[in-house]
Image (cartoon, helix red, strand yellow):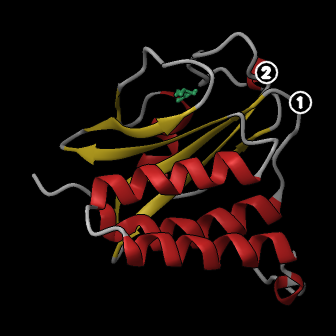
Amino acid sequence: MSHPIAEERPVVHGDALNALRAEIAEEPDPSAAAQRAVDMLHDRFGHYDWVGIYWVDGSDLVLGPWVGPQATEHTRIPIGTGVCGAAAASGTTEIVPDVNADPRYLACFASTRSEIVVPIFDGGEVIGEIDIDGSDHDAFDDMDARFLEEVAALVAPLRPRS
Ligand code: SME
């Protein structure tokens, strides 16, 4: 796939990536830095209503840092289950414009209308993912995907050591 407009990255995305690099550089504790990352995404982007990072643990995804109006009951998701598990299984970013039309969707919040899930890689291996829920239908586009794929590369080194 070609991205002919990749150089037209919005200023807000470039600014957020710079801020995130600075946050990670100044926070020596990886889990605190990962929390700062989700907080930053939530604070800067109004359509990112709930932001979480899941880390791969064996054949499951386990919820790490998150920020949003409510906790989710889905703190452990088998890889292959839900939109989250699908993205982890395939290593492909998932954009779901209408969660109610996607049979894979695991409901967390009554307010959620759309979702984006972006895998986090270490080398070629999926080690986690960024999961964002939106309260608007069709809240996420390819620009969000490319931005969050860059965020995913920055947070990959923050994976907890088991
Ligand atoms: N909706 C996700 C589950 C995680 S919650 O959105 C936080 C899914 O379908 O996998």
In the figure, is residue 36 to the left or right of 126? right
Q: Quadrant of the N terminus?
A: bottom right
Q: Amino acid at mark 2?
A: Ala
Res 104 quadrant in image: top right
Res 150 quadrant in image: bottom right
Q: Is residue 75 above or below residue 17?
A: above
For the point 14% across and 57% down, the residue is 161
Return the residue at label 2. 101
Quadrant where ligand 1 appears = top right
- First reached walking from the N terminus: tag 2 or tag 1: 2
Return the residue at label 1. 137
For the point 34% across and 53% down, the residue is 32
In the figure, is residue 157 to the left or right of 113? left
- Looking at the rendered structure, the secondary structure element under dot 2 is helix
> Foreground residue, 100 or 50?
50
Q: How many dots with numbers?
A: 2
